[in-house]
Every structure is written in structure tokens, then in C-alpha cells.
Amino acid sequence: MKTFLRLTLFAIFGSLFASTVVPQLTVFPAGKVDRSFGDGGTKAVGPAYIPGEVIRLSSGKLVWISSEQPFTSGLIIHVLKTSIDGDRDTSFGPNGSVDFSFGLGNFGISAAEEAGGSLIVVGSTQATGDARQLDIVVFRVRLDGTLDPNFGTGGSFIKNFGTANEFSEDSASAVAVLPDGKILVGATSTRYSTYPSRGTTTAEIIRLNPNGTIDTSFGTSGLVELSIGNNQAGTTFAQHFVYFTSYDDGRFLAAFNADRPTANGFLQEGEVARFFSDGSLDKGFGNGGRLLIPYLPNRSFLHLRETHENSPGR
């Protein structure tokens, strides 16, 4: 019988500026906490003002992505590497962690491992210093924790989806490294002409070459843009990409969710879309390439987290 491990950000303690991320390791199929992990099943691993994702590397080590707020600066992206038991990997940066900043405010959300062991990290940054503009940021972290200066422009790929007459709050929240080394990035973009009223929100998929430049053979000039339902101004105020799964033939699945206003607040609906390797929708999947997972009665949230290939093509 196979045993699967799931690592989640379990709790945050402390003040806003000195909080501690505590993981819980759950063993399946028994579903019980592994009390041999850390201190009775939990372990404090460091400060995190806003926790992001935890990924397990092919080596068995763990990478923790979060955002921190030092007293002397704005939010920074914090990348921590530990053993499976939560002990810091001292070969990675100063004492197992590194910090990155690309603008006034920086948010680290997710990461993916490349074949050589380096990391592709995604999130958002206020590159211009304008709080009304938020850009996606993608960068590579080498094995020793240093930024790869040859990736993108000066070590990062930064993009804003708004036009000259719009404010745009953009954030990358998912990343996958494909078998050929190219990089899929999932993001959301909320654009509006008058701050702070919300306008249209779209989901964006970008494919980058391994060197951090846009792969123009994908979609329209490297970009695929999606909306969910009646995506007019004010009707959808947040969408969140959550996961990619790729097939050996180059196709991939993207799972995401949208928050929709109601008379009593809002609800969440989910959607899964399947694409060919060139970014076009696979019309043989769902309804024209997209499968809506509707809001369930008596439920406030629907959050799609992961997609997996069960058997070839399924």
C-alpha cells in the first residue's frame, strides 16, 4: 500500500511583523498526524507575514515560499529550504533562506523545481512603486539560493497586463516546468479605469522559454487570456489560478476558481480547462475545452487546488 504525504501551512502565530509558520504533516491513508515530526507533529520554521506554498523537491527536501515585512523595508519574497523534518538546509543561502525584492511591495506565492534542481518562483511586485499597479514577477533561484541574473531581464520577468489608460492589479499564483524546460505561469489580472473601483478580471497563462523570455509560439504572442461567465465590470472581482498538470503529448490542464458577488456576499465557482501545447483550447474536453464546476447549495467556497492525471489522458 502506498503512503502519501501532504504538507500544508497549518497555522500562523505571533504579530503581523513576527509571525511563525507551522506545518502539519499528515500521513495517508491512515490520516493521522505524524507525531515524530518536529514537536509532536508541528515545527516552527521561521517568520512569514503572508504564507505561500510549500513544495517537495525531487531530493525530498522542502521549499517554503512566503512574504515577509522587515521593519526597515516593504514586503519581500522569502524562500526557505529545509529537510523533510523541517531543519534548515544551510547549503541554501545564509542559513537556509534567501530574500528577494523587485519593487516597493513583493508577494511570493508559488514555485516549481527545474530538472537541474533550481527553482522558478512566481508572485507579484509593485515594480513602479505605485500601489495601484501590481505586476507579476517570475524569477529563477539557483541551487545555492542566488538569483540567476541571466533569467529574463536582469534576473526576473516582470509584466503588467493593463493598458496605458488602466490600473491593473496582477498576480502570478501558479507555475509548472514542462518536460522541454519551458515554463507555464498562471496569473490573474484585475483592470479598472478609476481607482479603487473594480473592473474586469481575467485569468492569464504565459509560457516562457527556459531563459525567461516570452515564448511567442504559444497562444497570442506568448499569452492566453480567459474569462469565466459574464465577466463584465463589477461582476467578477477575483480569479485565482491554482494548478497545472501537463501531459506527455504537450497538452495541459489548468484549474482555477472565481469569486462571484451575490446579494449576501459572494460565492466561488471553479473551472478546469484543457489546452493543446500551442495554447489553443482542446475542444474535446468539457464544453468546448472548458468544464465548469458550479457553486454547490449551502456552500460558501469552492476552491480547486490540484489536478492529476489518473491514467493516460484521464
Image (spheres, rainbow, N blue to C red):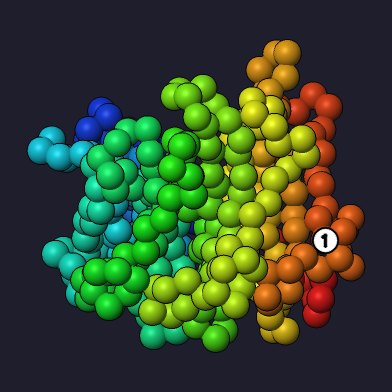
Residue 183 at x, y percent in the picture: 50, 73
The extreme front residue here reads 165
Q: Is residue 137 left or right of residue 143?
A: right
Residue 94, visible in the rendered structure: yes
Residue 27, visible in the rendered structure: no
Up the image or down, 115 lies above or below 228; here it is: below
Residue at 56% x, 78% y: name it.
178
Residue type at mark 1? Gly
Could you tell me which quadrant the N terminus lies in?
bottom right
Residue 279 at x, y percent in the picture: 68, 69
**Res. 227 image quadrant:** top right
Residue 296 at x, y percent in the picture: 82, 33
Residue 65 at x, y percent in the picture: 37, 55
Q: Number of marks in the image? A: 1
Helix or strand or loop: what does disc 1 sit on?
loop
Badge 1: residue crowd in 10 Å (few <14, some 14–19, many ≥20) = some
Up the image or down, 163 lies above or below 310; here it is: above
**Res. 272 image quadrant:** bottom right
Q: Is residue 178 left or right of residue 17?
A: right
**Res. 221 image quadrant:** bottom right
Q: What residue would you read off at disc 1?
A: 289
Judging depth in this view, the residue of 254 and 56 nearest the camera is 254
Residue at 29% x, 48% y: name it.
127
Judging depth in this view, the residue of 71 and 4 nearest the camera is 71
Could you tell me which quadrant the C terminus lies in?
bottom right
Judging depth in this view, the residue of 63 and 87 nearest the camera is 63
